[in-house]
């Protein structure tokens, strides 16, 4: 696979984004970055390094709907005529379909109430989100993808692996890696990242049972055991299975902290738990903090360790076995 990594700017979210270029028969970009002039410049420069331009792009594959991965898709499609593809769960949002966008906004407002985000912080978050609305760029015409599908890309093939959690439609694209095509590698978007633990609960409010959903994706990454993962942000991950296990362990520890918080504090809403876990929150973290807390609280409720009363959560088991709430892995 003739793979060229293009590093893009990103000062807001999880660190610099990557777009991946597969050149050959079907010139393909995996993710494209936010709709900003400087990111467009990074992308043009990256294509230029291998003697290509936007008009050469045949296909754009998107790992998930977040604007820092998809923002330029519409603009690039308009210029190149490229096919744009994303998982069927995320395609309507990327296409800017009114119903899908409105539904996501509605869930957002409902969750802000449920989580107990204070009025001032809510205003701060809404204005932050509005300020970054233009990162989404022009909407694209998106052809949906499903799990297991195989797609021609570059001079080879990619296989679609659905790994929901951070986003409902999060998709990895697998290929035969290495110069002689042995060993499997994958573009993983934000399913696992080398530095941060990808947010669950706040990053895609449409995901039901976000922590459980994400844990299942981590287990499938551990079992899959690819040789290398190419993430949506920062550098390649050389032992993706171990990285997924580390993130899983991180969530187990966080669940423990949530239980301790409920024990010390008594019944609490997601905002209160978030404040205990993360302290004072600003900008996007006003969404991600209580979202993460809620994902863990919801996990405890489904395990009958906590109960929800109104918007508050109360511990029903005083000394639960936390490790029993997470799957056993080979690590
Ligand atoms: Zn993301
Ligand atoms: Zn991202």
Image (tube, grey):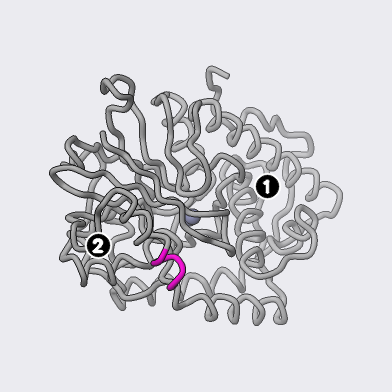
- Magenta stretch: helix, strand or loop mostly: helix
Residue 75 sits in quarter: bottom left
Image position of 212 with respect to 14: above or below: above
Tag on residue 294?
none
Decide if residue 298 is on the left or right side of residue 306.
Answer: left
Residue 193, position as x, y percentages in the image: 53, 42
In terms of depth relative to the viewer, which is nearer, 286 or 131?
131
In the depicted structure, whether residue 3 falls above or below residue 177: below
Q: Is mark 1 on a helix, strand or loop?
A: strand
Residue 306 is labelled as 1
What residue is at 20 percent from the left and 42 percent from the top?
154
Instruction: Locate the N terminus by quadrant.
Output: top left
Q: How crowded is mark 1: few (under 14 residues within 10 Å), some or many (20 or more)?
A: many
Q: Quadrant of residue 226?
A: top left
Q: How many C-alpha atoms fall within 10 Å of the one at disc 2: few (<14), some, or many (≥20)?
A: some
Task: Give the spatial CA distance, label 2 vs label 1.
Answer: 52 Å
Instruction: Answer whether residue 38 is magenta in the image.
Output: yes
Q: Position of residue 234 (x, y in %)?
A: 53, 46
Q: In the rendered structure, which disc, 2 or 1, sits on the residue that comes first in sequence?
A: 2
> Magenta span covers which residues?
37-41
Q: Determine if the magenta segment contains residue 180.
A: no
Which quarter of the image is occupied by the C terminus? top right
Residue ranking furthest to the left: 25
The residue sitting at 78% across, 50% down in the picture is 262
Place residue 167 in its image quadrant: bottom left
Q: In this view, does 325 lie to the left or right of 87?
A: right
Q: Which of 309 and 103 is in front in this view?
A: 103
Q: How many labels does the image show?
A: 2
Query: Is residue 238 toward the left or the right of residue 74 in the image?
Result: right
Q: Which residue lies furthest to the right in this view?
A: 264
Q: Is residue 146 left or right of residue 200?
A: left
Q: Residue 54 carries which label?
A: 2
């Amino acid at each position: 696979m003739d793979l060229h990594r293009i590093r893009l700017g990103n000062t807001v979210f999880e660190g610099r984004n990557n777009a991946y270029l597969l050149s050959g028969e079907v010139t393909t970009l995996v993710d494209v970055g936010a709709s900003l002039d400087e990111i467009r410049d990074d992308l043009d420069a990256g294509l230029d390094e291998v003697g290509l331009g936007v008009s050469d792009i045949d296909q754009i594959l998107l790992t998930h709907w977040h604007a820092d991965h998809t923002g330029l898709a519409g603009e690039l499609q308009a210029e190149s005529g490229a096919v744009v593809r994303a998982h069927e769960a995320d395609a309507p949002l990327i296409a800017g379909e009114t119903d899908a966008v409105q539904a996501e906004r509605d869930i957002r407002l409902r969750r802000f109430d449920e989580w107990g985000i204070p009025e001032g912080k809510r205003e701060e978050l809404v204005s932050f989100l509005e300020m970054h609305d233009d990162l989404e760029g022009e909407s694209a015409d998106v052809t949906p993808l499903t799990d297991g599908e195989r797609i021609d890309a570059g001079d080879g093939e990619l296989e679609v692996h659905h790994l929901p959690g951070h986003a409902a439609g999060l998709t990895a694209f697998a290929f035969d890696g290495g110069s002689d095509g042995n060993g499997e590698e994958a573009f993983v978007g934000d399913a696992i990242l080398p530095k941060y633990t990808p947010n669950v609960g706040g990053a895609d409010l449409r995901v039901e049972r976000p922590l459980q959903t994400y844990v299942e994706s981590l287990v499938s990454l551990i079992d899959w055991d690819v040789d290398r993962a190419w993430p949506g942000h920062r550098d390649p991950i050389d032992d993706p299975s171990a990285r997924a296990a580390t993130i899983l362990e991180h969530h187990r520890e966080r669940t423990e902290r949530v239980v301790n918080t409920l024990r010390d504090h008594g019944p609490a809403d997601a905002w209160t738990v978030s404040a205990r876990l993360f302290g004072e929150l600003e900008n996007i973290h006003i969404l991600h903090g209580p979202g993460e807390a809620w994902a863990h609280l919801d996990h405890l409720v489904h395990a009958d360790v906590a109960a929800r009363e109104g918007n508050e959560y109360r511990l029903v088991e005083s000394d639960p076995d936390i490790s029993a709430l997470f799957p056993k892995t080979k690590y």
